[in-house]
Amino acid sequence: MANIQFSGIGITAAAGKLGTEVYARNQHGPYVRSWVSPAQPASAFRDAQQQFLINVQAAWQALSPEIQESWNDHASLPAWRSKNKLGQLYSPSGRELFFKVNLTRDRTSSISSELPVKVALNDCRVLSFVHSGTGPGPAFNPILDLTWNANPTDPNQTLQLHFTSYLSTGISRPKPSYFKLLFNLASTFPFTSLDIGAQYVFRFGSYQTGKRIFVRSRVASRTSGDILSTAQVFLDT
């Protein structure tokens, strides 16, 4: 659904999908394009993600009206205000906040119905991304070296690693939609290095040479759903 801004002269700004058109903005200004249904190739990863969304929705519907209303009241607090596609501040609904909190959790964790609490987040940096293999297939062993700027002792924090598929080496600033969540690591994970080869091939397909892979790290709070974008690096295969 599009966000539309009105004034005394009519519509002054719009962002998002409206009917068969999408309103957006780039470095040259606002533009309109036709909406195209995104491709959703069947995969075990996609099915798992869809099932988790179904489970979160079912958990919300199973809450009593009184608990749902407490979520609505909690979401209206100033601390949870967010910005829409037009950059305007708004208060989310209780259902929006419920989804935000649970979608940042590890998929192996149980869905939480406890009201979230704002917490301070430890920053994290991805130091390097290197390919230790010598060829395609099993020899594709990209190693991600990680470190924390602060001691990762908070059990309510998790490190999310988002990757792109194999992109052209001419790309230096991939679109946010190119990044897909591949790892959601608990704060107790030994943050030194991580071999992502098998998981990456499972998600994006067989190894390709002459391509570029981007990774973006984000720290998330399991209790509030807050995200802190931290770092981005790439690897040329």
Image (tube, helix red, strand yellow):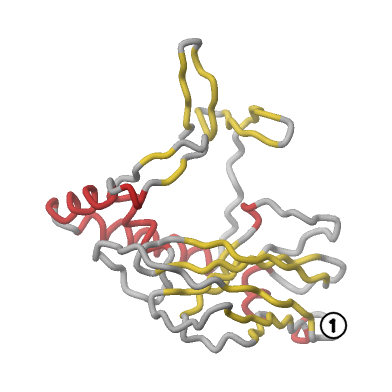
Q: Is residue 4 left or right of residue 194?
A: left
Name the residue rendered at 85%, 56% in the picture. 170
Q: Is residue 30 left or right of residue 142?
A: left
Q: Which amino acid type is marked by label 1?
A: Gly
Image coordinates of residue 78 in percent, x first then y, are 32, 47
Q: Is residue 122 left or right of residue 41?
A: left
Q: Nearer the viewer, residue 226 or 100?
A: 226
Element carrying mark 1: loop
Give above or below for 184 relative to 17: below
Quadrant occupied by the C terminus: bottom right
Crowding around mark 1 (Cα neighbors within 10 Å: few <14, some 14 to 19, many 20+) is some
Q: Is residue 128 left or right of residue 219?
A: right
Point out the residue furthest to the top here.
9
Name the residue rendered at 57%, 28% in the picture. 21
Name the residue rendered at 63%, 53% in the picture. 176
Give above or below for 87 relative to 29: below
Q: Nearer the viewer, residue 212 or 144?
A: 144
Image coordinates of residue 225 in percent, x first then y, are 40, 62
Image coordinates of residue 187 in percent, x first then y, are 47, 81
Q: Nearer the viewer, residue 40 or 223?
A: 223
Image coordinates of residue 36 in percent, x first then y, are 61, 38
The quarter of the picture where residue 215 lies is bottom right
Q: How many marks?
A: 1
Which residue was labeled with disc 1? 135
Name the residue rendered at 28%, 48% in the picture. 77
The quarter of the picture where residue 102 lies is bottom left
